């Protein structure tokens, strides 16, 4: 049965219109906050609602562009914790497309497979959720009689260690074929392997466009055929930094494809490094950070900027920055707030001492103590063993799903302990240094 006309076609453009669709994936609706740094209640609420806002914007884009279809290549949800409230929100948004005559094609990803509501929710009739059989669906017939077929495969389990390509039907002859696949491709260091396959495998299959999902960074892997990983439409923490969006695809009656990236995310995470070299007073520090924040904010079209500020370089303020870390965060947050819809997620201090206050110099007692701590105390076997025991106990108190973020093996645990001990010793010494040297003045 032919697909229903979109509102644009019904308005008089007729079947001469090309086939146009929006390709997205990895929305992870209502995923829990993943950053312990989001202690600001207003900021936490902004990030908590960001994935829902991304879906609303995607639906708005589909309606504005008058596309024929929305393709969602997996991971609408975020696993087993998905609530029926989340699913009902999704159904309500897809109903907006249904009312406009725009179809939706969905494949389940590894996170969707864990969600019980994925199986229970009743979606509008215009929504097609692919099963594991890969049977093609007619999406549209163009003016020259060529048909557009959508192929897709959902997996019922959260793990797919083998390629799903053998389950796809071959391309429909004399037609335009679009495939939907949730896959890690040949592997990614930050994503679980899922339905692995190579770009060459996809090229050989004979489809005109592959709508992929699973990897959260956008990449066009091939132009002929088009193999596109759209990336996620909304970042959720600093590790998903940068502007996020979706891909708008136009296929004409000759099968020629045109791609356009459209920004979606209302909140953008970014890292900002500010060099403190040569800055000697607190006011100068705040001015330097404020100028860099202002330039970054002006260059982004997103509604909200959430930034992690990293201070580097040599400055005589290094000790004070460590001692007064809470004041530093509060003042930089105020500078950001003055720019409007700019939030500080975290401030990292990597500054080292200026030439007049070089740590490790034996010309003064604090310098001698610093050398003693770093060379003798931190490397002592008994100290390292005690620190490792404490770290192992703390890891056991974390939820199981968070432990791999801190230590994936024994070597990673040892590096974590060493880095924590070094950072802690510097903080302690900073307090001793300023208490002995006096407060000084700005």
Image (spheres, helix red, strand yellow):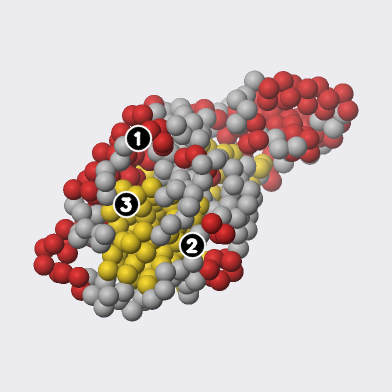
Q: Nearer the viewer, residue 243 or 218?
A: 218
The residue that appears at 63% across and 28% down in the rendered structure is 400
Residue 19: percent from left, percent from top: 29, 67
Q: Nearer the viewer, residue 330 or 52?
A: 52
Residue 251: percent from left, percent from top: 33, 71
Give how far apart the Cα atoms at labels 1 and 2 are: 27 Å
Give how far apart the Cα atoms at labels 1 and 3 are: 15 Å
Q: Earlier in the sequence, mark 1 or mark 3?
A: 3
Q: Which residue is mark 1?
A: 121
Give how far apart the Cα atoms at labels 2 and 3 are: 20 Å
Residue 166: percent from left, percent from top: 57, 59
Q: Nearer the viewer, residue 313 or 417?
A: 417
Q: Is residue 292 visible?
A: no
| Secondary structure state at the residue bearing disc 1 | loop
The residue that appears at 78% across and 35% down in the rendered structure is 410
| Secondary structure state at the residue bearing disc 3 | strand
Residue 248: percent from left, percent from top: 34, 62
Q: Which residue is mark 2?
A: 169
Quadrant holding the N terminus: bottom left
The residue that appears at 60% across and 63% down in the rendered structure is 198
Quadrant position of residue 102: bottom left
In the image, 183: left or right of 41?
A: right
- Residue 90 drawn above or below residue 217: above
- CB within 8 Å, label 1 to label 2: no
For disc 3, the neighbor class at 10 Å (few under 14, some 14 to 19, many from 20) is many
Q: Which residue is mark 3?
A: 104
Q: Residue furthest left?
A: 12
Marks 1 and 2: which is nearer the front?
A: 2
The residue that appears at 87% across and 29% down in the rendered structure is 380
């Amino acid at each position: 049965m032919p697909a229903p006309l979109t509102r644009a076609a019904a308005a008089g453009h007729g079947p001469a219109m090309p086939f146009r669709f929006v390709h997205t994936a990895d929305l992870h609706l209502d995923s829990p906050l993943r950053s312990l740094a989001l202690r600001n209640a207003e900021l936490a609420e902004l990030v908590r609602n960001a994935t829902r806002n991304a879906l609303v914007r995607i639906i708005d884009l589909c309606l504005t562009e008058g596309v024929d279809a929305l393709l969602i290549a997996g991971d609408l949800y975020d696993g087993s914790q998905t609530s029926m409230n989340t699913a009902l929100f999704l159904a309500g948004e897809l109903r907006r497309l249904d009312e406009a005559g725009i179809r939706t094609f969905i494949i389940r990803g590894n996170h969707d497979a864990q969600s019980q509501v994925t199986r229970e929710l009743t979606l509008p009739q215009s929504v097609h959720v692919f099963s594991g059989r890969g049977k093609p669906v007619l999406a549209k017939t163009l003016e020259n009689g060529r048909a557009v077929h959508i192929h897709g495969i959902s997996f019922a389990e959260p793990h797919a260690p083998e390629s799903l390509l053998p389950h796809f039907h071959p391309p429909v002859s004399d037609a335009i074929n679009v495939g939907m696949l949730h896959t890690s491709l040949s592997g990614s260091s930050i994503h679980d392997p899922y339905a692995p396959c190579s770009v060459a495998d996809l090229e050989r299959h004979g489809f005109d466009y592959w709508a992929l999902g699973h990897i959260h960074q956008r990449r066009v892997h091939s132009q002929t055929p088009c193999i596109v990983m759209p990336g996620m439409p909304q970042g959720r923490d600093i590790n998903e930094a940068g502007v996020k969006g979706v891909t708008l695809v136009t296929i004409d009656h000759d099968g020629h494809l045109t791609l356009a990236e459209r920004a979606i995310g209302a909140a953008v995470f970014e890292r900002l490094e500010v060099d403190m070299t040569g800055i000697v007073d607190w006011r100068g520090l705040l001015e330097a950070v404020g100028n860099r924040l202002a330039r970054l904010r002006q260059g982004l079209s997103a509604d909200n900027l959430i930034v992690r500020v990293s201070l580097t370089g040599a400055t005589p303020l290094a000790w004070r920055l460590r001692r007064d870390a809470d004041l530093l965060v509060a003042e930089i947050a105020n500078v950001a707030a003055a720019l409007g819809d700019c939030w500080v997620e975290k401030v990292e201090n990597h500054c080292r001492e200026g030439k007049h206050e070089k740590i490790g110099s034996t010309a003064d007692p604090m310098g001698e103590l610093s050398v003693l701590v770093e060379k003798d105390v931190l490397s002592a076997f008994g100290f390292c063993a005690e620190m490792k025991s404490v770290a192992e106990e703390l890891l056991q108190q974390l939820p199981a799903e968070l432990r791999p973020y801190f230590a994936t093996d024994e070597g990673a645990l040892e590096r974590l302990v060493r880095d924590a001990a070094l950072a802690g010793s510097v903080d302690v010494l900073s307090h001793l240094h300023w208490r002995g040297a006096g407060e000084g003045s700005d």
